[in-house]
Image (tube, helix red, strand yellow):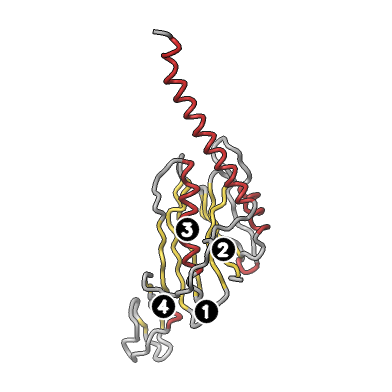
Amino acid sequence: MDVNYIFLPFLGIVLLAMLFCLSVAIKQINAIKDSMNGKIIVPECPPQIINDYSDCDIVMPSYSCPECGGVIEQGAYSCSFCGHKRPESVIRYQKTFHNRFNIGLTSQYYKANADISKEVNAWFLSHSNLENVNINMEYNTNLTNRLLKKVTVSFTIGEKENNTLYGVTPIYNGFGLFWQKSAQDVFNSWKSHNPNCLVLNITGGTTNQTLVSVSSGGLPLVFANNNGAHFIAFKTNRN
């Protein structure tokens, strides 16, 4: 048998591996460029505002009744002593979004992160009377994934619509041996392109960070300079 034919399958495997690595590298470079250009992932067409919360969980902590001073128990709609009805302002709602991708190849996690971000941001666009909003992001990181696997939004419902828009977006600073940038540099570049966005929370890498003095626009306490994806929760004006 010709020795050249023996190495043909091996050569084919090597070429496929090189093509895969090239594809991943190109996607990562483009993702980093998008991050540094400050692109926010939002739906192309804003949906109609519906303000429907029937698909949300209701969280009602216990608190002191303003009428008689008794305790309105956790989960109760009214005071068991005087019958005072729990006001809407102390009823918290919770909406949870799950990434439909649990595992996947490195070249797929960009799309997976974009999909869940679009779903979250579309929901925010269609709900305009949110107040006291908290956004918690959970991510999964391993050799092949940097996935935003769950976003939990907790809030109260205001009496009228407001002009505040919330959202989440992934940013990327590299992976493995491919082109990398400092995570802090990528964040600063994204922020410079979105000066009207107030960052509420950041997660990614090996740590979970919140910001110092959000009201004054403080920078993160710690922003890990590691590889992969980071995720920003922010708020801005609708207009």
Is residue 131 visible in the rendered image? The answer is: no
Cα gap from disc 3 to disc 1, whole angstroms: 25 Å
- Of the 4 image quadrants, the one containing the N terminus is top left
Pointer 2 local density, CA inside 10 Å: few below 14, some 14–19, many at least 20: some
Residue sitting at x 60%, y 46%: 32
Of the numbered discs 3 and 2, the one sitting upstream in the chain is: 3
State the residue at coordinates (40%, 86%): 65
Q: Amino acid at mark 1?
A: Glu
Judged from this view, the residue extending furthest toward the top is 1
* Viewer-nearest of discs 4 and 2: 2
In front: mark 3 or mark 1?
1
Task: Give x and y (percent) for residue 176.
Answer: 54, 37
Kind of residue at badge 2: Phe
Secondary structure type for disc 2: strand
Q: Which residue is mark 4?
A: 91
Q: Nearer the viewer, residue 101 or 217?
A: 101
Left or right of residue 196, residue 126 in this image: left
Q: Residues within 10 Å of mark 3 (few under 14, many from 20)?
A: many
The label on residue 137 is 3
Q: Camera-side residue: 37 or 19?
A: 19
